Amino acid sequence: MNPSVLYASTRTPDATTRCQNRTREMQLIPEALARAHVQERLYEAEAERMARRLARASRLQRRAERASLRARRALAQVVMQ
């Protein structure tokens, strides 16, 4: 008798399906890890962009406050003359 036929007859279709599913899952693990890694990098990049925006907004606000103060001083000097 052919050994492959004997082997196939001892395994149930359910066991074969489980084995195939497990094999498929094992093959998909690196893809899932890569996807998770990319997602994490995207979150990090977005957080870094937000931090840069906040820092830039703070710098611009300080610059605007200084310009406003200079304008007030200049106006005060004109009024006092």
Image (cartoon, helix red, strand yellow):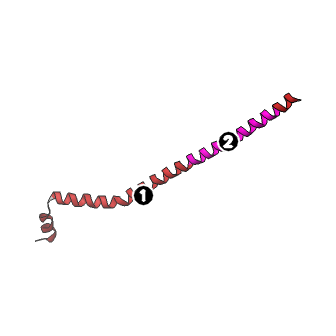
Q: Main secondary structure of the magenta part?
A: helix
Give the side of residue 72 with respect to residue 8, left or right. Answer: right
Residue farthest toward the top in the current orientation of the protein: 79
Residue at 56% across, 46% down: 50
Amino acid type for the residue under numbered disc 1: Ala
- Viewport quadrant of the C terminus: top right
Q: Is residue 23 above or below residue 76?
A: below
Residue 79, quarter of the rendered image: top right
Q: In the image, is residue 44 part of the stretch drawn in magenta?
A: no
Amino acid type for the residue under numbered disc 2: Leu
Q: Which mark is residue 34?
A: 1
Specify start and end residues of the magenta stretch as a single range: 49-74
Residue 35, quarter of the rendered image: bottom left
Residue at 31% across, 61% down: 26
Residue at 60% across, 48% down: 52
Distance in Å between CA atoms under marks 1 and 2? 39 Å
- Numbered disc 1: secondary structure: helix
Callout 2 environment at 10 Å: few (<14), some (14 to 19), or many (20+)?
few
Give the side of residue 81 with respect to residue 55, left or right. Answer: right
Give the side of residue 80 with respect to residue 42, left or right. Answer: right
